[in-house]
Amino acid sequence: MKIVVIGGSGQIGSRLVKALQAQGHQMVAASPSSGVNTITREGLAEAMNGADVVVDVSNAPSWEDAAVLAFFQTSTQNLVAAARAHGVGHYLALSIVGTDGMADNGYMRAKKVQQDLIKASGLPYTIVQATQFFEFLDLIIQAGADGDVIRLSPALIQPIAADDVVAALSELVVSTPQNETIELAGPEPFPLDALARNLLARKGDKRAVIADVHARYFGVQLTDKSLTPQSPSARLAPTKLDDWLKR
């Protein structure tokens, strides 16, 4: 099976390419660094020629509101057109849990546009919405820094290991297109403020973490439904945070 991974040099993409190569698939790790640009379309037709599946795990080079919207809109339109032209049988995209309910965040608005374009494309598709990665928790905590303290919402977060995301994508890539959105999360929900205290204590960081229901998460005021899966059929990954930290 020929599989094109858009964003194939990134954190998820590079691991996915390696995992699928080990299964014997013909892989194309597509990114600007490999000569495939989904904005200019450079190398896109060549990459898609003969492809059975395209997997979009790409990320925007800028998260500024207008720039990230332009990226996902243009990139997805070009990918959809190329996939149609070359008879790709499965379009798989990685998105984020909570996208539909975080319109105050420009990145989430852009990801929703991406999802809507895929659903309207007429292509057989699967969209995977994953919760935040364990690997991003430090960034999330630091975003709440306010002088000598950290202000975070006590809303629930249910993070996941990046390797578990790769494992789920590896399974779905070679499966029948679902033509729906699948939620994917870690096995444990935590109040965000309590999680931050735990992780900071492990590092010896003595800054106080203040629970603030009005604290913004990248511009969004959270509820317990914002960063956790809502579907009763959501897939829960096996790796617990403590086990990941020990590794």
Image: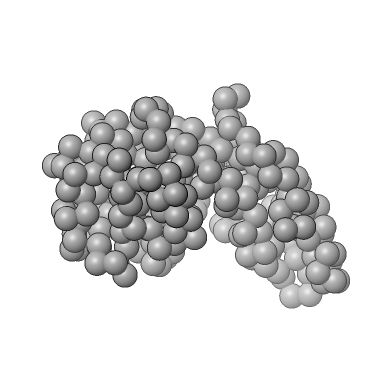
Report the quarter where the N terminus lies: top left
Residue projecting furthest to the bottom: 147
In front of the other: 196 or 109: 196
Residue at 40% in and 38% down: 173
Residue 157 versus residue 107 in the image, above or below: above
Q: Can you see residue 205?
A: yes
Residue projecting furthest to the top: 232
Residue at 75% in and 51% down: 243
x and y percentages locating residue 71 in the rendered image: 32, 59
Residue at 31% in and 49% down: 26
Residue 98 versus residue 231 in the image, above or below: below
Report the quarter where the C terminus lies: bottom right
Residue at 16% in and 53% down: 45
Q: Can you see residue 158?
A: no
x and y percentages locating residue 189 in the rendered image: 72, 41
x and y percentages locating residue 67 in the rendered image: 35, 63
In front of the other: 41 or 109: 41
x and y percentages locating residue 214 in the rendered image: 69, 52
User: Does residue 60 appear to the left or right of 247 in the view shown?
Assistant: left
User: Does residue 72 appear to the left or right of 152 in the view shown?
Assistant: left
